[in-house]
Amino acid sequence: MVAAQDISHSQRIGTPADRRARITGVVLIGLALFVAGVFSIGVTGDATFRLSRPNDVWAIPNLVLPAAPFNYIIAAVLAFLGARQFLRGGGRWTTLSLGIGLALAVAAFLVWATAGKAFSLTGMLQATMVRAVPLVLGAITGMMCERVGVVNIAIEGMLLAGAFTGALMGSLLGGVGGLIAAIGIGGLFGFILAALVVTYRMDQIIAGVVINLFVLGLTSYVSSQVFAEHRFLNNAPVFRAYKVPILGDIPVIGPMFFNQNLFVYGALVMVGVATYYLFYTRMGLRARSVGEHPRAADTLGINVYRTRYINVTVAGMIAGFGGAWFTLGSVGRFDENMTGGRGFIALAAMLFGRYHPVGALMAALVFGFADSMQQKLALLQTPIPSEFLSMAPYIATIIVVAGVVGRTRTPAAGGKPYIKE
Amino acid sequence: MTDQTASDPLTQKLLERAAPSRAEFEDLVIVPIFAVIVALAVGALVMLATAVDLPTIGQSYVALVRGSVGSLNALSETLTAAAPLVLAGLGLALGFRAGLFNIGAEGQIVIGGLVAVIVGFSFAGLPWAIHLPLALFAGALAGALYASIAGWLRAATGAHEVITTIMLNLISYRILDYVLRQPFVQREGRADPISRSVLDSAQLPGLLTWIDPNLRVHAGVFLVVLAVIVVYWLLFRTKVGFEFRASGKNPDAARYAGIRASFIIVAAMACAGALAGLAGANQVLGVLDRASPGFSAGIGFDAISVALLGRSHPVGVLFAGLLFGALEAGGRQMQVDAGVSVDLIGIIQALIIVFIAAPLLVRAIFPWGFRKSEAGRNE
């Protein structure tokens, strides 16, 4: 009786994968209808995307797309993908279709917003990379901690501390001095986090929240108590962009990757270094084993406490570097709470990137894209209120966390203090 | 531990339950007292480091006390500041008990306050007895619905509520900015985003205005007392409350016992959101009289500290809220009297939480304040 019920039940709903495929199909078809109905009907003119700048070495012509036909085609492709998922479903195509579908929908949106106007795609991609910097560095921070079993909610606070110290010490000692100080202060807060959760066995999430509160309080206090009077303390030099010869002249990706400042190059290098460290060195293997099964690691003679201390402290230094981007890498001046939740978006990027540095870079670029898109679209004067555009990165984060997190395998020992017997 | 008769663990557990032990007393009373003292001391060090001279530091702590409990006005300010903290803190405590780390009180306050304002300036002509409860209820409902988004996402997809609630906070600010510019909300003749004023019939009446019209304490304090009682009853006297606590203590055991995990998550978030929404309504109907960008003033984040400090117990939250309200009110006095930025209070609050949440740290700093042989207690 019960078994029979179970069978009919499972036949009706199918396996979770089938169900997911069906939901994906419905979402894609909905997107198709939306693109056709809102972004295509009644839209006139061409969307012009500028791919190179006037004084580029290798100039390539602008990309001109007729808005309405292009969006009808996108709607058709979306409908096809959706119908295919709905009817056939299956396997790894589901996630891929959803990813392609969302990318197409964004493209349709851009074409719709640009119809009859011109828009610099290169500039936007360059801004995307710039805005991804604190996110990817924050994500690597979170990853380094989480891989050794420490949940780091304090990325936000570490970034803020780095930004603040970068501005203060940068004003006093110059850019390089500020950068080193920012990295140092990030390391200090990493060490404090490690001490709180490893030695004093504080709840990891509470420890993170407290560090965030503390840094926010301290930096706001100093900036209103001291910076308001002594402005010279909050006037740091900014690292200028450095164009890599030849590579920087490649159209579209040249400006994005090879005509940036120290922080962008640093972030890209960190992705490589972190990947190498975590997956190709003995230290990295040990770190990961501590995050998966600390007791087994301990039995094999790995010092769990020391591994956690070292990794969390180094992770804090990376966050300090990322934090310095806010001041030394862009405006040279510290404002209260200037990180504005980016530490948490970085956490989402870490999840989206499945605890892998390269994945985190990709995820950070997606968020950076959403971030720079809302800024550039404000210039295009679309009928969408600016408040809704500025929600885009946050909504993207929620969608990503909701859509991906259930399928990401987290390090097994995350969030638990380890008590040596 | 030193007791010979209580050698086996079961007897000891029973004994502990029968009479609160010295250890519990230490955790509940001595640790918080030490925490406050250390936090104030570190605050003084921070002031020293930022070139505030010693007499000013003394003066600022005197102002802190004077501004929080030194006069009738100070007490009124303390209660006014404490009310929303306790309300939102109760909501967060409820979530913590159910194992949900909801950081979204801020956004729920914004949305709850916004909806309460809209109800508060609409419906002219309703009697006070209907309009005020309606506005409060609308605020609570809006907060509950907004929080349920995060609860539903957690239950349906496993999206961690820490991230989703923070994102919802950021989104709520944008919603507020947007709604405040809409013609039916924006005050006539104003270009900046500011709402119309709440009608008299929807305002929480001042309690001591008959002594001095400047005393701001309002009927929201009754709301607070009521909420403490209701949350206590809900958590410790009802089946749902038991399910909340069971899910928080051990989600797997709760699931095997037949507790519907998804339902509990959404319900706990909705309750938390309702209380936070009520806190927002309390602010706009009792203190501010209108909504403007940033009217939530970080209450939702302070409420996290309040809930943690209160050990997620309704009565504890009440006292923690009063302490934080006093710090808030005293901090403003401090800024006026001694010229020390009110942001210092944020540092002190964070430090208090550090020491409360890491009893081992306090024990390490003050070894003489506690009984020896604590090794066995910390599992």
Image (cartoon, rainbow, N blue to C red):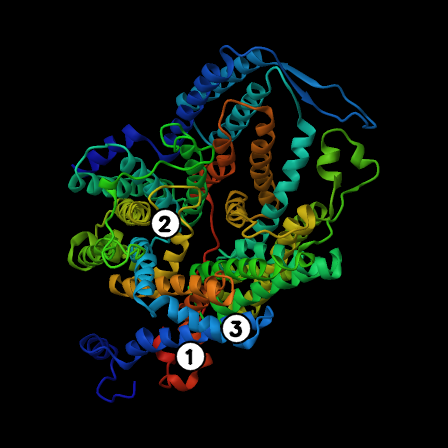
Q: Is residue B174 visible?
A: yes
Q: Is residue A150 above or below residue A269?
A: below
Same chain shared by disc 1 and disc 2: yes
Placement of the C terminus of chain B among the 4 image quadrants: bottom left
Q: Chain of mark 2?
A: B
Q: Residue at x 58, y 42 (%)?
A: A364
Q: Are marks 1 and 2 in contact (CB under 8 Å)?
A: no
**Residue at position x 24%, y 57% in the image:** B208
- Circle 3 SS class: helix
Residue beneath label 1, please? B363
> Where's residue A98, x and y in %?
48, 29
Crowdedness of circle 2 by 10 Å Cα count: few (<14), some, many (20+)?
many
Amino acid type at circle 1 is: Arg
Q: Nearer the viewer, residue A29 or A326?
A: A326
Residue at image x 28%, y 28%? A12
Which residue is identified by label 2?
Answer: B105
Q: Which residue is at a point 59% across and 33% down the rendered structure image? A: A375
Q: Chain of mark 3?
A: B
